[in-house]
Image: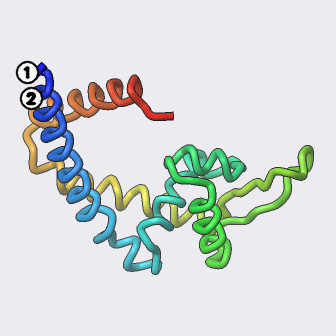
Amino acid sequence: MASQHKHYSELENYMLAVKKFFVEYFRQTMNGSRMREEADFTFLDLKGLSAFADDRKEYTMGELSSSVNLPSPHMTSIIERLLKKGIVKKHRDREDRRYVKVRLTDKGRELRDRFMRVRIQEIENSLGKLNKRDQGKLLEALKTATDIFRKIQYR
């Protein structure tokens, strides 16, 4: 029993180290984002913008929330801010008036495209410091971790 406890303790330490890595990584690449500074965006605004995987599609609030793993009330607040900035439009679904559909405006599509280009550049700038072998090892480790976390995902 003591060895199992030690195993879980070691696992917890590794998970905390990974958490610290990602918190710092996203702090550097998202919070310091040129997009945030240029467009007066908060981190959550950028996260909301990234929820639009297909910039021509209309989404329900639930779909947007799910795509970036945010609770619906948070996504609703983000969408309201983006609506005031002219980045999204929303309307009631024609077939089922209970649903609100949201889509990017032309301005929103332009900002999303620019945001994605900036994100890719920021990722290249940070991960480009690794050699190809280490990049591959990191990618495989992240894929493995994702698969494992999907197995134990809390519901």
Secondary element under disc 2, as helix, strand or loop, is: helix
Q: Is residue 108 left or right of residue 96?
A: left
Q: Please provide percent x and percent y for residue 95.
A: 92, 44
What crowding class fits label 1: few (fewer than 14 Cα within 10 Å), some (14-19), or many (20 or more)? few
**Above or below: residue 20 compared with residue 88:** above
The CA span between labels 1 and 2 is 5 Å
View extreme (front): residue? 1
Identify the residue at image location x=42%, y=56%: 116
Identify the residue at image location x=35%, y=25%: 147
Q: Nearer the viewer, residue 3 or 104?
A: 3
Residue 61 seen by the camera: yes
Q: Nearer the viewer, residue 15 or 54?
A: 15
Identify the residue at image location x=55%, y=46%: 53
Q: Nearer the viewer, residue 6 or 83?
A: 6
**Above or below: residue 2 compared with residue 109:** above
Q: Please provide percent x and percent y for residue 64.
A: 61, 50
Q: Please provide percent x and percent y for residue 126.
A: 18, 55
Q: Which mark is residue 3?
A: 1
Q: Nearer the viewer, residue 20 or 10?
A: 10
Q: How many marks?
A: 2
Secondary element under disc 1, as helix, strand or loop, is: helix
Residue 109 seen by the camera: no
Three-letter code, disc 1 = Ser
| Quadrant housing residue 122 | bottom left
Q: Please provide percent x and percent y for residue 117.
A: 39, 57
Would you name the residue on which mark 2 appears? 6
Identify the residue at image location x=33%, y=63%: 30
What crowding class fits label 2: few (fewer than 14 Cα within 10 Å), some (14-19), or many (20 or more)? few
Q: Is residue 45 left or right of residue 87?
A: left
**Above or below: residue 85 compared with residue 56:** below
